[in-house]
Image (tube, rainbow, N blue to C red):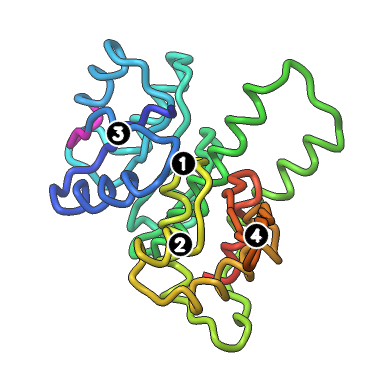
Amino acid sequence: MIKVMIVEDDPMVREFNKHYLQQMSGFQHITSVSNGDEALDVLQNEPIDLILLDIYMPGMNGLQLLETIRLRDQSVDVIVITAASDIVSVKKALRLGAVDYLIKPFEFSRFQAALHTYREEVNLMQSQNQMSQEELDKLLFHAADVKGHTESIDLPKGLTKNTLQLVYNCVDGMKGKSFTTEELAAEVGISRVSMRKYLQFLNEIGVLDVEICYGFVGRPSYTYRYLPDKASRIHRYL
C-alpha cells in the first residue's frame, strides 16, 4: 500500500481530498495536517510515500515545505493540489520534483488519473532493479499523456460518462477480484443488459480481462477481472 499524507490548511478541502483518496485502491491515508511544520514532524516519525500538498498555507507554505524535504533528502513523492496557477509556482514545484500538479478546482477523473499514473510508476519501479530504454520511454510518455490530457473522447452510442464513471469506480474497488455482470449491476444499480454494454466496452479498450465459462447447458457465463496497469486507457473517456 502507498502511504499518503494530506497537507492542506482548509478542513473542508482536507476531507474532500481524503474522500477522493479513499476511493482509490492501493493507497492508505495515514494522516492529514494543516501546515508545513506539522508535516515535517510526521515525516520524522511515520513512513510516508506520497504527499498531497497545497501551496497556500500559513507559516511554511507548500513550496517551502517541498524545498525543505529535498534539502533533507527525504524519500517521499509529492503531488501538488493547489489554487496556485502562476507559472512561477508551477515551475518551482516541478523543479523541486513534484510528480504532478493539480490546479483547483479539478475533476475527480483528473485526480484519479494522477494517482493511477503514480501507482503504475511505483509498481514498475518496485518490480525490477533495471529498466530498458523502451520501458522507461513507455513510462515517461505514458505519464505525459495522462497528465497533459484535457479533452475527453466521445463514448460509443448508448453509454454515458456519468454511468461509466460509476461502473469504473466499482470495478476499481474490486481490488483485483473477479466479478460477474450480475454482481456489478447490483452494486452500481443498473440493469444487467446495460451493465453488459459497459463491461463489453471496458473489455474492448483493454481495461478488463474476460473469461468465458461454458457449462453443460444454457448460455456461457462471463467473469471479468480489472487490469490496473491498463487504467490509463479509460481516462480519456471520463
- Whole-Å distance between the Cαs marked 2 and 3? 19 Å
Q: Would residue 101 be found to the left or right of residue 15 on screen?
A: right
Mark nearer the N terminus (1 vs 3): 3
Q: Would residue 191 be found to the left or right of residue 138 on screen?
A: left
Magenta residues, as a range? 32-36
Residue at which label 3 appears:
29
Mark in the foreground, 4 or 2: 4
Amino acid type at circle 2 is Ser
**In this view, which residue lies farthest toward the left?**
11
Amino acid type at circle 4 is Arg
- Which quarter of the picture shows residue 169? bottom left
* Coordinates of residue 76 in the picture (x, y in percent): 45, 24
**Number of residues whose C-alpha sits closer than 10 Å to that of mark 2, classed few (under 14), some (14–19) or many (20 or more):** some
Q: Would residue 104 be found to the left or right of residue 116 on screen?
A: left
**In this view, which residue lies farthest toward the top?**
45
- Whole-Å distance between the Cαs marked 1 and 3? 17 Å
- Which quarter of the picture shows residue 182? bottom left
Mark nearer the N terminus (3 vs 4): 3
Residue at which label 2 appears:
109
**For residue 127, above or below residue 169:** above
Q: In the rendered structure, does residue 34 fall within the stretch colored magenta?
A: yes
Residue 233 got which mark? 4
Say which element carries label 3. strand
Mark nearer the N terminus (2 vs 3): 3
Mark in the foreground, 2 or 1: 1
- Whole-Å distance between the Cαs marked 3 and 4? 26 Å
**Camera-side residue: 50 or 154?**
154
Residue at which label 1 appears:
175
Say which element carries label 2. helix
- Whole-Å distance between the Cαs marked 1 and 4? 18 Å
